[in-house]
Image (cartoon, grey):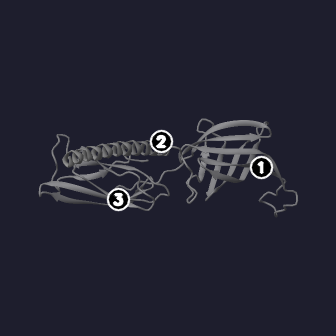
Amino acid sequence: MKNIISIYEKKIHGTVQLAIARKLRTYFGAVLALAFLLVSPMASSTGFTVYTTISPMTGLWWNQDESGWGVGLTQQYGVIFATLYTYDFEGRPTWYVASNCVVAADGCTGDLYAVTGGSPLTVPWNSANKIVTTVGTINFAFTDTNTGTMNYTINGVTGSRAITRQIFATEPIQTGRFPFDFKGVRLNSVAFSPLLGVICQATLSFTNVSDVAVSPALFFDVIVDGVKTGQVPFLTFGLAPGATATDTTQPVISNGSYLACGTFTLQFNSSASQVR
């Protein structure tokens, strides 16, 4: 009888353990599903947010299809000062300012003013006749640090314009010596070292000297006896402002053969290189 009781006790104990295990699986499954639901929307968000610890939006902005008007943006932390130069209904040059465009999420919003009655620079300044008038509101919504939309209401008229950062000069590219700068990335040095005593490795050091994180794709042409025989990339992703990275590659020529150190030179290709 004792043995029979022992057998039943084991069966009951095993059944209880199985039931508990099933309950735990169900519970943890529900917890994981809930965690997935809570995390997924945040993880899938790809919206652009304007930094307020640096000044990435500062610069001249325009619509390249409407040359003749534009807007100057100066960002200091969480505020953007906007100066809009355009024309009135009679074609006369007109200026508006938004002195307190408060940054939120992907842009900023503020009141728009017209200022009249000041003195020209050729005479002593007299502010007695200066009149500041609120004429409407302005909003900037950016998709990245180089493109966006300007929405406005001026004297009761509402409108919208696509804007991009105006580039009127580019930094000179020095390809003859290190260091040199390319689109906010400083190329510090390139070093060569043999791999297994046969294949040459090239290691490039580069620093992000801009105010935002970048992903450089830097390309060098492989030159053998004065002839371009191939191209090598040096890559990194999400390089933080002020950070330095290195990337190593093994240069090859067009037939797929690896090169030995001393049999080639690398020449920076600014046309193929990109910094995003």
Is 194 positioned to the left or the right of 161 in the image?
Answer: left
Mark 1–mark 2 Cα distance, whole angstroms, equals 46 Å
Residue at mark 2: 37
Residue 64 visible to the viewer:
yes
Is 197 positioned to the left or the right of 37 in the image?
Answer: left
CB of mark 1 within 8 Å of CB of mark 2? no
Residue 224 visible to the viewer:
no
Mark 3–mark 1 Cα distance, whole angstroms, equals 46 Å
Question: Is label 3 or label 2 in front?
Answer: 2
Mark 2, secondary structure of its residue: helix
Closer to the chain start, of discs 3 and 1, is: 1
Residue at mark 3: 245
Q: Dot 2, crowdedness within 10 Å: few (<14), some or many (≥20)?
A: few
CB of mark 3 within 8 Å of CB of mark 1? no
Residue at mark 1: 113
Where residue 206 appears, as percent x and y from the top left, is 36, 58
Question: Is label 1 or label 2 in front?
Answer: 2
**Is residue 89 positioned above or below 96 on the image?**
above
Q: Amino acid at mark 2?
A: Leu
Residue occupying the far bottom of the picture? 124
Q: Amino acid at mark 1?
A: Tyr
Mark 3, secondary structure of its residue: strand
Q: Residue at x 57, y 51 (%)?
A: 50
Mark 3–mark 2 Cα distance, whole angstroms, equals 36 Å
Where residue 235 appears, as percent x and y from the top left, is 33, 50
Closer to the chain start, of discs 1 and 2, is: 2
Res 143 → quadrant: top right
Q: Residue at x 79, y 38 (%)?
A: 156
Where residue 271 appears, as percent x and y from the top left, is 38, 44
Q: Dot 1, crowdedness within 10 Å: few (<14), some or many (≥20)?
A: many
- Tag shown at residue 90: none
